[in-house]
Image (spheres, rainbow, N blue to C red):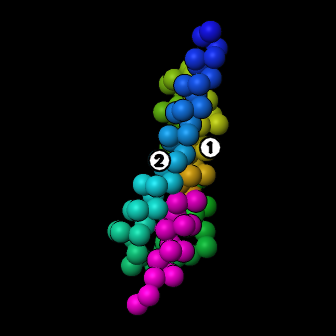
């Protein structure tokens, strides 16, 4: 019973972290970083995702039921949010 509850909690927290990281980052890039040249470079999503994943590692290490996979998926969500936010800004009409 406890294993099922822990698995469900892990899936929920991982989903919220990755989707939340994506949405918050996409809105931040579109709203605040649209005129920053560095966000439009190719390596910006990779750097942002890596930094977010590394910064999330100590946080997920505190909780025994959340693993490294949560930090990795959070980093992927942030990287994808940066990529999507900068792509949509380029497609907006002047």
Q: Residues within 10 Å of mark 1 (few under 14, many from 20)?
A: many
Q: CA distance from mark 1 to mark 2?
A: 14 Å
Residue 55 location, x and y as percent?
50, 43
Q: Which mark is residue 92?
A: none
The answer to whether the residues at label 1 and label 2 have Cβ atoms under 8 Å apart is no
Taking depth in this image into account, of 62 and 28 the one nearest to the observer is 28
| Residue 30: image location, x then y, percent | 41, 69
Q: Which residue is mark 1?
A: 72
Residue 53 in sight here: no
Q: How far across and down, in percent of the image, does residue 21 sit? A: 48, 50
Q: Secondary structure at mark 1?
A: helix
Height in image: 53 above or below 46? above
Can you say whether 53 is above or below 43 in the image? above
Q: Quadrant of residue 31?
A: bottom left
Magenta stretch: give its range: 80-94
Write down the residue under mark 2.
Answer: 20
Left or right of 2: which side holds 23?
left
The answer to whether residue 89 is magenta is: yes
Closer to the eye: label 1 or 2:
2
Where disc 2 sits, the SS reads helix
């Amino acid at each position: 019973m406890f294993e099922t509850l822990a698995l469900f909690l892990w899936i929920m927290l991982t989903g919220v972290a990755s989707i939340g990281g994506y949405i918050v980052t996409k809105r931040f890039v579109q709203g605040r970083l649209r005129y920053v040249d560095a966000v439009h470079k190719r390596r910006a999503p990779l750097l942002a995702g890596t930094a977010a994943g590394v910064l999330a590692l100590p946080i997920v290490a505190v909780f025994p039921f959340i693993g490294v996979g949560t930090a990795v998926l959070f980093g992927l969500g942030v990287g994808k949010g940066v990529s999507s936010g900068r792509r949509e800004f380029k497609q907006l009409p002047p």
